[in-house]
Amino acid sequence: MKKIILASGSPRRREILSDTGLDFDVYISGADEGAVSPDGITFGMYVQELALLKARDAAKSIDKKGHLIISADTVVVCDDEIMGKPKDREDAFAMLKKLSGKSHSVFTGVCVWRSDDAFSVCSAVETKVQFKELTDEKIKSYIATGESDDKAGGYAVQGKGAALIKNVDGDYLNVVGLPLLKLFEILENDFGYNFFEGECK
């Protein structure tokens, strides 16, 4: 039976995967994400490269056979600009002000790596998120909750940030940080993983 490793320190990704009932261990990747540049490639390819980087780092560190390593990376894109985690609350205000009344994209790259032979499959999912028109007061009130402090784009769709959102078009869990439908598709189709028996063919 293959042991599943989630190469992510994100509590949101851990929660999503835990809710499926899958048994897995967590490895927090120390990969240098600055080694991957978004220049000259699509946003979808960029997040796939980041996810692959994390999976490869985990594989080198764990260095054991019989593992399936899952990794992911998520970015928020508005007006062709990648919005990372805000540096401070002033930065969070600027991000949310920019998102106000607009539709933006959330891209997550997901990768599965088989430690036996270094075979990997990566894919990317895009979800469109439409924000309500936000007053400065509402933005400040949300930021004051502290929820925006460590979130890409300055908001959490699964938290109080849901009150800022008008519509989500696509995989909701992709916005949270792990596109479960795509992950399950890869595990089943490319790795022969049987979810109900908890093993590969």
Image (cartoon, rainbow, N blue to C red):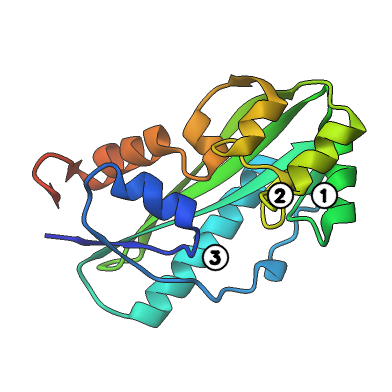
Q: Are marks 3 and 1 in contact (CB under 8 Å)?
A: no
Between discs 2 and 1, the one toward the N terminus: 1
Q: Are marks 2 and 3 in contact (CB under 8 Å)?
A: no
Q: Residues within 10 Å of mark 2 (few under 14, many from 20)?
A: many
Give the side of residue 109 with respect to residue 13, left or right.
Answer: right
Residue 42 lies, in percent from the top left, at 71, 42
Of labels 3 and 1, the one closer to you? 1
Q: Hey, which quadrant is residue 156 in on the image?
A: top right
| Three-letter amino acid code of the residue under disc 3 | Leu
- Residue 90 visible, this angle: yes
Identity of the residue drawn at 20% across and 68% down: 66
Identity of the residue drawn at 48% across and 48% down: 110
Q: Secondary structure at mark 1?
A: helix
Q: Is residue 140 above or below residue 113?
A: above
Q: Can you tell which mark lies on residue 92?
A: 1
Q: Are marks 2 and 1 in contact (CB under 8 Å)?
A: yes
For marks 3 and 1, give the CA distance: 27 Å
